Amino acid sequence: MPKIDLDFVEKLTLQERADLVSGKDFWFTAKVSGVDKMMMTDGPSGLRKQEQTGDALGINNSVDAVCFPSSALTASSFDDQMLYQLGEHLGIAANAEHIGVLLGPGVNIKRSPLAGRNFEYFAEEPLLAGRMGVAYVKGVQSKGVGVSVKHFAANNRENQRFTSSSNVDERALREVYLAQFEQIVKKAHPATIMCSYNRLNGTLNSQNQRLLTDILRNEWGFAGVVMSDWGAVADHVAAIKAGLDLEMPGKGAVSSKEIIAAVNEGRLEESTLNRSALRVLKMAAKYSQTNQPAVTYDKREQHEFARQAADDGIVLLKNEGNLLPLSAEESLAIIGELAEKPRYEGGGSSHVNAHNVVTPLAAAPANSAYAPGYSLSGDQVDPGAALELAKEKDIVIFFAGFPEEMETEGFDKQTIDLPTDQVALLDEILKVNSRVIVVLQNGSVVAMPWANRVPAIVETYLAGEAVGEATWDILTGAVNPSGKLAESFPLRLADNPTYGTFDANHDNENYYEGIFVGYRYYDLHQLPVRFPFGHGLSYTKFAYRDLQIVEKADHVQLSFKVKNIGVRAGKDVPQVYVGNRASRVEVPVWTLAQFNKVALQAGEEKTVTMDLSRRAFSWYNAAEQRWEADNGTYEIAVGHSSRDLVLISSFDLTIGVDPLAKITGETYVGELLAMKSQKVTAALKKAGMMAIIKQAIATPDAAAIFNNIPLRSLTMTGIKHEQIANFLRDVND
């Protein structure tokens, strides 16, 4: 292969360079002299390589491939190592199918529970989404296969996704919607980033220079290819200028002609075209496997890993009276058509032609009997047989969830309620048997007005092709559950921060809630939730103690002890939250700052050590265009979830910046006195102001008023303008 550099690109014909910046045959880059084409395919949860290369929408069957759990479930593992291994398995499969770049993972934030594609995304929390994304990307790329991290950026609704504008303030954009992309770019170096369909604050993302060049490349140092989502480019020339390298899937000869015409007419610099063509060539040269020899891989082993991955993520939401794990002596009624026809994968680009689907019914133990009770297709089903079965058996396992037509790529949901026939049947069953375990199959948040009447609830999300085996692993106790929710479950839809505004405007999606997304919103408004972010039970118990916090030169180190105080081995996810009590801006009550998954035998205790960087204490100062960690008081909490914080300790950060580094006429008296600075006191005395201030704040009522006056307005108290000017000069010297 020739050396791929700018000299090589400049020797290509203008036609060849124009060809390189637009896709060919839906899934390939263009072939040019000396460099073969490269294939890419969907595959966040398993390969969706189409048997016919022109089948962009997946109308025909894709190749046989193992279907792994959806990102909604894998993120619930809170397990970096498992996500890395998932990436490795996907990379192995991609190699076997000659795939150069895998289109995934999706890392957009779960802003609204109605967003139709939430099943394909990791979390409502950018730190968690970023950590999972970093591990996934590193795993795939360790096998010589590139990835395309998507959808960049603020793609949080499906309706009108090609044209709507996500209107979000700069601080929320940086802290919530870009933070996970930044983490992945800097730590995992993905081969490509896929820009999303939507506009961001009025500018189409495919031609958003600030997003694609100023932030992604110049700030974060991204060196790979920026490609479009399929059909996202409205103006190819404007997109290339803004920093897009590859239009997918391309418009055939039209795409090349428009680029050639733009160069010939002086509307596009050749150097700009050459830059993008070089990036695409480097990607194709590195990852193309078109002419590689055929290889095989062990799909049985991959299926077994899919089962383990589901085991690691399934969340035990409720287990009143320790109804779970099941006893082999008790008879079981399995009710719900989802047991026989499970919802185990997402639709659209996430759909996989699964290798070996094992249904919950097929994997059920011998001491069970089945009745569908309801129909996913909406056909009338007599619930009588299900109710009779519920009466006869000791325990009911009720499978409930959303049919695929309720949540998939391309449109948003209208409700988070389960179908009415499922809820009605559950109500009737509870009248004849109170020992009911609800097993959920869903892509995102479910409203559960019935939760208080059900003793046990298990969240399996979309668990992949081993859904049946993994479900019973958890129910029987063969595996001790360790999943934690990566999103908050509100009591009702109306409680969520986007209620009433999400999808309300045809052309604009306005992010009125700012930084207060998910648990940050519920904490701020002190709203009760059904199940909080980070929640998940185990068949054992874990205790935390001895939190130690030490400030180092450039980070804060903390350690604490975790002990398994139950009678069986299990895995725990201690979560560390930071409460900013120092900054003079609105901040969340708590923000997830670190987590770790720890395996412990019964009675075993381990010391967990974590480092918190300055970023963990920072907020984005839009006025200064920088991240700012303010010195002052912070709280650090260790807990089982965002609402179950066990250890809380306060400490003073000193490795940041002083929020009152420069004192001005706008500084308030109360802020000045709160600094307790000897320099401030000396300057006040020298200026002849201290005695007047002390007299003015002698009583609590007077102090409350006087402390809320800026320095420049102290002239109304008899302090002269010259005194204030002298004080400011001395204190800032």
Image: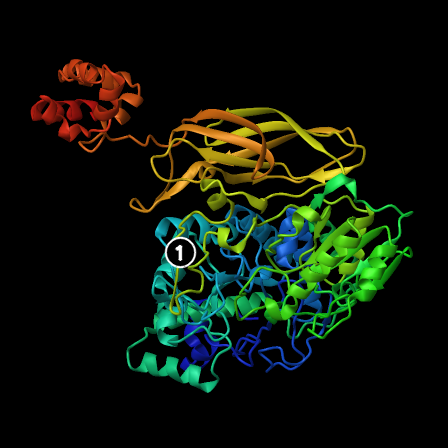
Splitting the image into 4 quarters, where does residue 733 fall? top left
Give the residue at the far front of this rendering.
Answer: 431
Q: Residues within 10 Å of mark 1 (few under 14, many from 20)?
A: many
Q: How is the image coloured?
A: rainbow
The location of residue 297, given as percent across then percent down, is 77, 65
Above or below, 684 relative to 132: above
Q: Residue at x 20, y 33 (%)?
A: 666
Relative to 372, is 149 on the left or the right?
A: left
Q: Is residue 316 visible?
A: no
- Give x and y (percent) for residue 455: 73, 46
Residue appearing at x 77%, y 49% in the figure:
434
Label 1 is placed on what type of residue? Answer: Tyr
What residue is disc 1 on? 511
663, 228: nearer the viewer: 663
Q: Looking at the image, can residue 729 be seen?
A: yes
Q: Residue at x 28, y 27 (%)?
A: 671
The picture places residue 685, in percent across and down from the top left corner, at: 17, 14
